[in-house]
Amino acid sequence: MITSTSNEKIKYMEKLRKSASFRREEGLFPVEGIRMVREIPKDRLAALYYTEKAYEKYGAEGCEIELVSDACMKKMSDTDTPQGVLAAVRTVDYSLDDILTRKTNLSDKTKNDKSVTAAVTQKENAYSTPFLLVLEKLQDPGNLGTIIRTAEAAGVTGIMISRDSADIYNPKTIRSTMGALFRMRIYISDDLVRDMAELKKKGIVIYAMHLDGEEFYDKDFRKPSAFLIGNEGNGLSDELSSVADEKMRIPMLGKVESLNAAISASVVSYEVLRQRRGI
């Protein structure tokens, strides 16, 4: 058991927690809590740490583990009351092409169940039509995590994020995804304007969520689509808005001028899902 908080492994995990640049260099990020750890694909699990109490309660999840003291776990953890389970997980780099499709997989048993097969086939058809969320300069890790979680639930095929947005491997982002981070394809873009041109070449319509746009609910989103969502405080930049095929706005009553970025993404995602259910 590791008992010293000065141990190199403990300091390494602490640095992964604190530093986005170190996470990028190492290609690793920390994940806390038994529920999240159970969501990790086995081929991405690099290291696993347990306290004795957590090991007695949860078991080792079929992987080799390192036992650490409560003090060491506290040192590595980003939460005030750690559950006693923490993992180092390998990052994944997706390309622009990777995020254009996202299909479900039918097991042999499921294939023989016609009612289940019909439902899953409907999902596969929806997933085969690109539906992207494009996030520019999103700064709040909690908002980003919520968008990733909602995107999975609503059938988004992929997410594109500008390089200057919050880190998708920030501990707060990870917790907010509730495991969706391991299943959602996310592409980090160095140039959103350039990438929008590539999407247009592939026949994808670009919609900018903008206060000066047309009402959102009047449009048909069953064709390949990408939706631009801007910074929490300033919205989309003029440069990125200018490359959109159309500007759209979510109708708002009362004196509300704008919606939280995560809420906007949720409204967009579920309207597209509603329209595509019968595809």
Image (spheres, rainbow, N blue to C red):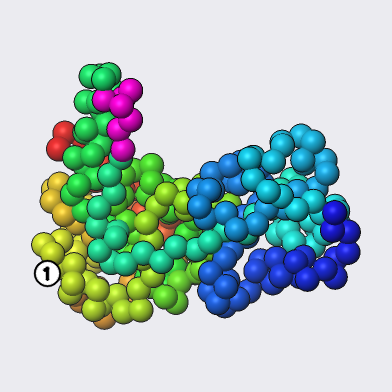
Point out the image quarter for the N terminus.
bottom right
Magenta segment: does it hold 110? Answer: yes
Residue type at numbered disc 1: Lys
- Identify which residue is drawn at 32% across, 56% down: 158
Q: Is residue 182 above or below residue 199?
A: above
Q: Which residue is mark 1?
A: 201
Q: Quadrant of residue 23?
A: bottom right
- Identify which residue is drawn at 75% across, 66% down: 9
Front residue of 84 and 176: 84
Q: Position of residue 189 (x, y in %)?
A: 35, 73
Q: Position of residue 57 (x, y in %)?
A: 76, 34
Front residue of 204 and 8: 8
Judged from the image, the secondary structure of the residue bearing numbered disc 1 is: helix
- Identify which residue is drawn at 43% across, 54% down: 147
Q: Position of residue 186 (x, y in %)?
A: 38, 61
Q: Which residues are magenta?
A: 105-111
Q: Is residue 87 left or right of residue 223?
A: right
Q: Quadrant of residue 159?
A: bottom left
